[in-house]
Image (tube, grey):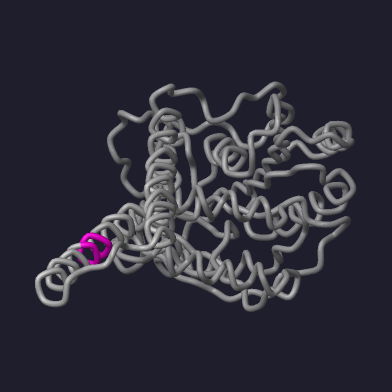
Amino acid sequence: MLTRQTLPPSISCVIPAYNEARSLGTLVPEILTALQRLSPQVELIIVDDGSRDDTSAVMQTLCASHPQVLYLKLSRNFGKEPALTAGIEAAQGDVVVLMDGDGQHPVSLVPEMLAKWRAGADVVYAIRKTRLDQSGLQIKLTAWFYKLVNLGNRVKIPANAGDFRLMDRQVVDALKRLTERNRFMKGLYAWVGFNSTAIDYEPLPRTDGKSNFGLRGSLSLAFTGILAFSIAPLRALTVTGFMLSMIALGYGFWVVGEYFITGIKVPGYATIVVGMMFFSGIQLLSIGILAEYVGRIYEEVKQRPNYLVSQRLGRGLPTTPSAAAGGSPDALPLPQAYPSSQA
């Protein structure tokens, strides 16, 4: 039986892009050249997430020059998570590499990832060593997020692990079976499991311009991740309600005891007002958290597609039966095409 060591895999590389026209012209040939050193069968999938610059014109030129490039233009800006989903569902390779379109993910690490895949790892994900390109507030918020999302959660999401990773075909097929609308890809990578290993990397300087994903986008994604992969907010409400009930019960006993022992004076107006405002705030906060969960249930029930493709250019790799079958939610799990040497 052929193993991962003896048979060169076909490689798909997925890059979501939003207003990266000035960097794609140099980034695409660089990545494509690096991939072709590793395998004779490669494809580079660029997913244009509703860019407003000249990304479409740049990609038309690149597709004409490089038949291995596949360009998917989404009908509007759906967000990075749906763009990644579009690329993953279009990928046909035996292994799939995910990278960003800003040039900060070093393609020089792909050979190391591939070596770990040959050694038996199904997922090889990269962990950032530093966050020098982020503010101190964003670094602290990121650390708090990973602690909160992993609190009491059976599925642990690795801290500082982003989308830069290599995945085996069976992992890709498993991801394609997850059809939820509120997608948090870092959580989905962890949820599907499989044999995973990590490597460290230092982000490179951006090829051009500045990041389109600032603090506001990070907070929105973190909020989605917490609501999609953690019930910690609901448990916090339960604990808070229990504690307040115990405090109120204790205060009630104290009032009754004071009445029978020393007598009781008329309570102050300020105490009543502060108490009402405090408990009203707790109730409104609780309703708001519940509403966020209900709102996401509403989004799931509508079952709208995660993305729409308005234009498709290029060839990429030919469609394989396993890749096509993996996109069906009702398909049975597929056997691993490249058995591990440890099997």
Tally the numbered discs.
0
Instruction: Let me know if residue 2 appears in the view.
Output: no
Residue 130: quadrant of the picture: bottom right
Q: Quadrant of the C terminus?
A: bottom left
Tell me if I can see residue 206 in this picture.
yes
Please, is residue 75 above or below residue 177 in the view?
above
Write the residue at 63% across / 49% down. 13
Nearer-the-camera pick, 6 or 206: 206
Q: Residue at x 45, y 45 (%)?
A: 172
Quarter of image, res 86: top right
Residue 82 appears at what percent x and percent y? 57, 38
Please name whichever residue, 165 or 210, is drawn nearer the observer in this view of the structure.
210
Question: Dominant secondary structure of the magenta stretch?
Answer: helix
Residue occupying image coordinates x 41% and y 38%: 291
Is 67 on the left or on the right of 99, as rendered? right
Judged left or right of residue 122, residue 93 is: right
Which region shows up in magenta?
A: 243-248
Quadrant housing the N terminus: bottom left
- Residue 184 in the image, given as x and y percentages of width and height: 49, 48
Q: Position of residue 202 (x, y in %)?
A: 69, 75
Q: Nearer the viewer, residue 97 or 202?
A: 202
Give coordinates of residue 320: x percent, y percent. 49, 33
Magenta residue check for 215: no
